């Protein structure tokens, strides 16, 4: 370049030293509060209209959408009600969805409105508590099998099973406590799903015996279920849960900018023991933004839960969401909030529990200590007495837990009978003699 040369584009040397960036705005740039992706716009619209939707394999509710996105898409943008039946929300045949809701009574008008809303959804199981229907019946509609367990008192449990999930002959059921505790078994491709549907009695004076009876019936039915089956428990438990183990995510919930623990039930420990004994994870307790599941003028609480075995509680199952913006949820008065979850159909190899209890050798050894009345027997007896005195177990479920605790404490005190060197040598000689006799007898019969 000659002296005095000036490039039209500026200094050429500087162009090689650093990349030049154009700071001018692009033509037709969208405002920062707009939603640019059409699939996401449609998902937000469905969530606003139905209270929830599927988006990229996850449950999307209006609470999870950014506020400026909600402002950009108002209800005025709807020309008609969009369908919420999205067939690509999860790989085909691998998961099933479940909606659980205490409807606080189903009148004819509410039932018709619920049917219209369900027709636009993509749900496999629908569990409704407190229908206030007294009849016990089963019937079919164009899309669902219906199984209802009625009660003369305030209660009633209705389960709607989608025909896409199974046929009617693949469903069996039992009303353990009519209108309060219901068990369904659904065959899913060689494996079965055990669905436990519950509406626990309200905590009030005179209901302690009824609540204890339901806990005991629940324990009895859970103890008979095979581990090879999938297990889902859902319903209104009328009991708050605090975090006492890794089975409960958060013991409180979000309400009006504060963390609220909710009222504490006197028999919560029985519920916690059931969770621990059967390794049940509370699916709707893992998000700090989750609110209450029951609202009324005197306060709020989280008493509606979905439970599953730990082996079946994957990350998507723990994304169980509440639907406070569902169109059918009343905005005033005592109101329960629906819960929706997605669970896997595939069977997981559930780890077998370690063998517990007393073998015959242990029992014989303990009997020898008892006959000798030695120090080992005195220590065992003292440990049992102290544990029973300090125990507060009052229900069979609590007694079962106490029994396992005593096994863990007393078992190590009683060692298995061991053979010394002389006894082992004598035992080997006896085996050799028995083998020779058996061999000789076989040769004799052969001749």
Image: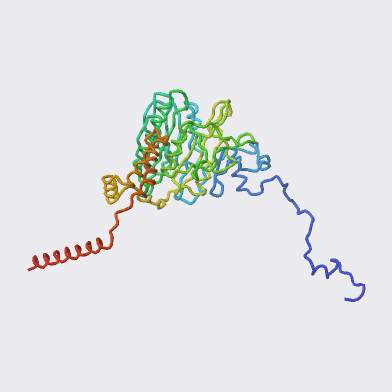
Task: Out of 204 and 140, give the one closest to the viewer.
Answer: 204
Left or right, 124 with respect to 19, comes to: left
Q: Nearer the viewer, residue 196 or 445?
A: 445
Question: Is residue 177 toward the left or the right of residue 110 in the image?
Answer: left
Q: Is residue 17 above or below residue 352?
A: below
Camera sees residue 133 = yes
The outermost residue toward the left is 447
Task: Name the quadrant containing residue 403.
Answer: top left
Q: Position of residue 372 (x, y in %)?
A: 27, 46
- Specify whether residue 167 is in view: no
How many marks the image carries: the answer is 0
* Closer to us: 16 or 316: 316
Question: Looking at the picture, how far across and down is residue 132, in whole percent?
Answer: 44, 26
State left or right for residue 282 relative to residue 413.
right
Q: Is residue 256 above or below residue 229?
A: above
Instruction: Depth check: give the residue in front, 62 or 311.
Output: 311
Which colour scheme appears in the figure?
Answer: rainbow
The C terminus - image quarter: bottom left
Image spot of residue 414 (x, y percent) = 33, 49
Of all residues shown, which one is farthest toward the bottom?
2
Q: Position of residue 21 (x, y in %)?
A: 78, 61
Q: Is residue 86 left or right of residue 219?
A: right
Please identify the quadrant where the N terminus is shown. bottom right
């Amino acid at each position: 370049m000659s002296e005095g040369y000036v490039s039209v584009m500026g200094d050429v040397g500087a162009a090689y030293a650093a990349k030049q960036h154009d700071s001018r705005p692009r033509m037709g740039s969208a405002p920062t509060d707009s939603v640019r992706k059409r699939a996401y716009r449609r998902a937000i619209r469905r969530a606003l209209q139905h209270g929830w939707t599927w988006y990229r394999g996850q449950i999307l509710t209006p609470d999870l959408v950014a506020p400026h996105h909600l402002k950009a898409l108002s209800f005025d943008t709807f020309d008609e009600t969009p369908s919420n039946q999205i067939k690509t929300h999860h790989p085909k045949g691998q998961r099933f969805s479940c909606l659980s809701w205490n409807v606080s009574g189903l009148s004819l008008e509410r039932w018709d409105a619920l049917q219209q809303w369900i027709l636009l959804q993509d749900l496999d199981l629908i569990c409704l508590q407190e229908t206030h229907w007294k009849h016990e019946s089963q019937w079919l509609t164009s899309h669902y099998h219906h199984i209802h367990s009625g009660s003369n008192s305030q209660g009633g449990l209705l389960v709607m099973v989608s025909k896409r999930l199974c046929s009617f002959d693949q469903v069996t059921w039992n009303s353990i406590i009519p209108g309060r505790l219901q068990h369904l078994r659904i065959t899913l491709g060689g494996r079965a799903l055990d669905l436990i549907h519950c509406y626990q009695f309200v905590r009030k004076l005179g209901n302690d015996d009824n609540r204890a009876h339901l806990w005991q019936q629940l324990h009895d039915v859970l103890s008979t279920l095979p581990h090879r089956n999938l297990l889902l428990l859902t319903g209104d438990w009328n009991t708050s849960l605090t975090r006492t183990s890794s089975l409960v995510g958060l013991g409180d919930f979000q309400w009006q900018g504060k963390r609220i623990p909710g009222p504490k039930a006197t028999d919560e420990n029985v519920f916690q023991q059931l969770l621990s004994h059967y390794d049940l994870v509370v699916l709707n307790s893992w998000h700090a933004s989750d609110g209450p599941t029951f609202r009324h003028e005197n306060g709020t609480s989280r008493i509606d839960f979905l439970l599953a075995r730990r082996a079946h509680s994957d990350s998507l199952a723990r994304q169980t969401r509440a639907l406070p913006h569902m169109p059918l949820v009343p905005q005033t008065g005592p109101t329960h909030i629906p819960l929706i979850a997605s669970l896997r159909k595939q069977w997981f190899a559930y780890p077998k529990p370690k063998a517990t209890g007393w073998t015959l050798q242990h029992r014989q050894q303990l009997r020898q200590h008892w006959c000798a009345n030695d120090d080992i027997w005195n220590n065992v007896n003292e440990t049992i007495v102290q544990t029973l005195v300090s125990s507060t177990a009052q229900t069979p479920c609590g007694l079962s837990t106490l029994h396992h605790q005593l096994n863990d404490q007393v078992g190590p005190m009683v060692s298995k009978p061991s053979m010394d060197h002389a006894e082992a040598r004598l035992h080997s000689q006896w085996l050799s003699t028995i083998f020779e006799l058996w061999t000789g007898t076989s040769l004799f019969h052969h001749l």
